[in-house]
Image: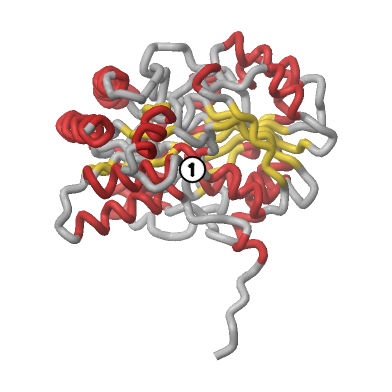
Amino acid sequence: MSKIVLSSCVNRIEESPTLAITAKALKLKSEGKDIIGLAAGEPDFDTPDFIKKAAIEAINSGFTKYTAVSGMPSLKDAIVQKFKNENGLDYTTAEVIVGVGGKQCIFNLCLALLETGDEVIIPAPYWVSYTDITQLTGATPVVVQCGIEQSFKMTPEQLSSAITKNTKLIFLNSPSNPTGAVYTKDELIKLASILLEHPHVFIGTDDIYEHISLDDTPFYNILMVEPRLKDRVIVLNGVSKAYSMTGWRIGYAAGPKEIIVAMGKLQSQSTSNPTSISQVAAEAALRGDQDCIKPMVKAFKERHAFVLKALNEIDGVKCIPASGAFYAFADARKAIEALFSKNKINAANDLAFSEFILETTGVAVVPGSAFGSEGYFRISFATSMDNLVEALKRLKQAIEG
């Protein structure tokens, strides 16, 4: 058999670390091990009944055929109304695309805009796929380190220093995965003032956690605070997190028509349209009673308070409050050094630390290096309080024992 040579394109990327860790935890669980998975970014709540009902009615009525590649018109209209009513942004349906999850929208955006020689500014800690998708296109990720000392947020000075003549795109994710950091209106205004000076730079604002607010900090994205950037901003969102619809795979984006059309062209040659039934469910979610989000957010606030306190009571671990999403991003650098010095882990890094935690306690966490920040780990508190209580107890015992 001849040697299989894979493309340079696929060799530029790695498997999603969060999905890989979740898969490993599930494998251990299937083998009978007592595993508590805190890796997946997925709400543990069910999709609200009125959304499921809309999908069932779509099936029963035979709405099971192809739709327009970029999304059915009524869903795109619902997205337009959402942007207008919730964000004060005016778009036409021609400036909106519906994708197979938010990740596909980001993937299509990068393929539509980037090529070899371009640079993409990515503040770290970052969502795991920004860098890999960037590299897939042949462009270069320019990672800007934004540690716990600056509340995991990029400063205007850092942004200004990172921009070059080759910069094509910047990603902003607020509320953030993995940190839960939220840029305030004033912080976004300052970043926008820098971007106004560089008209060659496009901005992808990833708002997927928009509705998961933990401290009532008002939500803004960069276009909401600086309308003059509209011809360069692509707003990325979806129904996965707010409505607990991860498996339904519906994301959407809005931006300059030329870019949206290009994203649609790419989609026409890959997935074609998102699932018809999921689109009906997504429209029901966007047009329905938004109070359905409140019980989930209330639970996340309670869990966040518990996790924050419990993490900060562990020797060598430091965690600052999150303002949104459902993650705690803990600084474990001192704990890692202590475990290494005691010969409990074979390397002083967060990967060895996370493997030690999984193997000795059965708790799956994601190492910070997966998000571009060595020495940290991420916990998802989108799981039951009982799981969190037990997991944090095990973590404390493993680190301090």
Residue 64: name its quadrant: bottom left
Q: In the structure shown, which secondary structural element does the residue marked by tag 1 occupy?
A: helix
Which residue is labeled 1 in the image? 370
Q: Quadrant of the C terminus?
A: top left
Question: Which residue is pictured at 36% across the width and 43% down the height?
Answer: 354
Q: Is residue 329 visible?
A: no
Residue at the far right in the pictured view: 165
| Residue placed furthest toward the top | 186
- Quarter residue 88 falls in: top right
Instruction: Provide residue 237's location: percent of width, then percent of height.
Output: 51, 34
Q: Residue at x 28, y 52 (%)?
A: 25
Please indicate whether residue 209 sits to the left or right of residue 91 in the image. Answer: left
Picture layout, residue 398 above or below residue 155: below
Q: Position of residue 294 (x, y in %)?
A: 29, 21
User: Label 1 neighbourhood size at 10 Å, few (<14), some (14-19), many (20+)?
Assistant: many
Figure colour scheme: secondary structure
Q: Nearer the viewer, residue 91 or 43?
A: 43
Which of 252 and 173 lies nearest the eye of the viewer?
A: 173
Q: Is residue 61 above or below residue 324?
A: below
User: In the rendered view, does 196 fall on the left or right side of 137?
Assistant: right
Residue 345 lies, in percent from the top left, at 35, 44
**Amino acid type at mark 1:** Ala
Residue 387 % position (x, y): 18, 35
- Residue 394 visible in the snapshot: yes
**Residue 397 falls in image quadrant:** top left
* Residue at x 61% of width, y 13% of height: 187
Which residue occupies the extreme bottom position in the image? 1
Q: Quadrant of the N terminus?
A: bottom right
Return the residue nearer the eye: 340 or 265: 340
In this rendering, the count of numbered labels is 1
Which residue is drawn at the image coordinates 68% and 46% (left, top)? 261
